[in-house]
Image: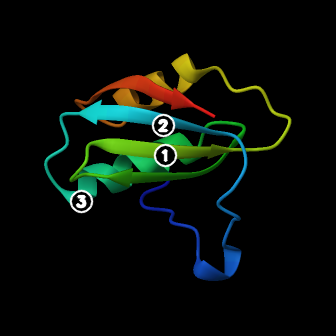
């Protein structure tokens, strides 16, 4: 199990490309956002996940040309803890 395996700034990923935005409920602190990001970044085809606890939203950047089922992203959020998620936007 990888705990808080954040990508280093030297491994920065471009912020454009296909993305999914999730609405997440059940977060109460920044650690919740980090747990969700780490779980989502373990999903094949996910380049980066950025969760904003204040807005209750997460932007998930996907690899170009890789088909990621949004339901898998919702399941990953639920696996991170006692959170619920739904798809808000698919770019």
Quick one: quadrant of the C terminus?
Answer: top right
**Residue where numbered disc 1 is placed:** 59
Task: Please give left or right for residue 19 compared with residue 56 in the image.
Answer: right
Residue plotted at (53% across, 17% down): 71
Q: Give whichever of discs 3 and 2 has the lower sequence position.
A: 2
Q: Secondary structure at mark 2?
A: strand
Residue 23 vertical position relative to residue 86 in the rendered view, above or below: below
Residue plotted at (72% across, 38% down): 45
**Residue where numbered disc 2 is placed:** 21
Displayed quadrant of residue 13: bottom right
Task: Please give left or right for residue 56 compared with residue 66 in the image.
Answer: left
Q: Residue 16 in the image: x percent, y percent?
A: 69, 55
**Residue where numbered disc 3 is placed:** 30
Task: Please give left or right for residue 45 compared with residue 30 in the image.
Answer: right
Q: Is disc 2 in contact with disc 1, using a CB cutoff of under 8 Å?
A: yes
Alpha carbon distance from label 2 to label 1: 5 Å
Instruction: Specify the farthest residue to the bottom.
Output: 10
């Amino acid at each position: 199990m990888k705990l808080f395996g954040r990508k280093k700034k030297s491994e920065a990923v471009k912020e454009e490309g296909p993305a999914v935005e999730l609405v997440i409920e059940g977060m109460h602190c920044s650690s919740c956002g980090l747990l969700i990001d780490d779980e989502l970044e373990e999903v094949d085809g996910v380049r980066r996940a950025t969760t904003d606890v204040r807005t209750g939203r997460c932007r998930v950047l996907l690899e170009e040309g890789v088909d990621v089922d949004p339901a898998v992203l919702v399941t990953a959020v639920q696996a991170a803890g006692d959170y619920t998620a739904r798809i808000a936007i698919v770019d």
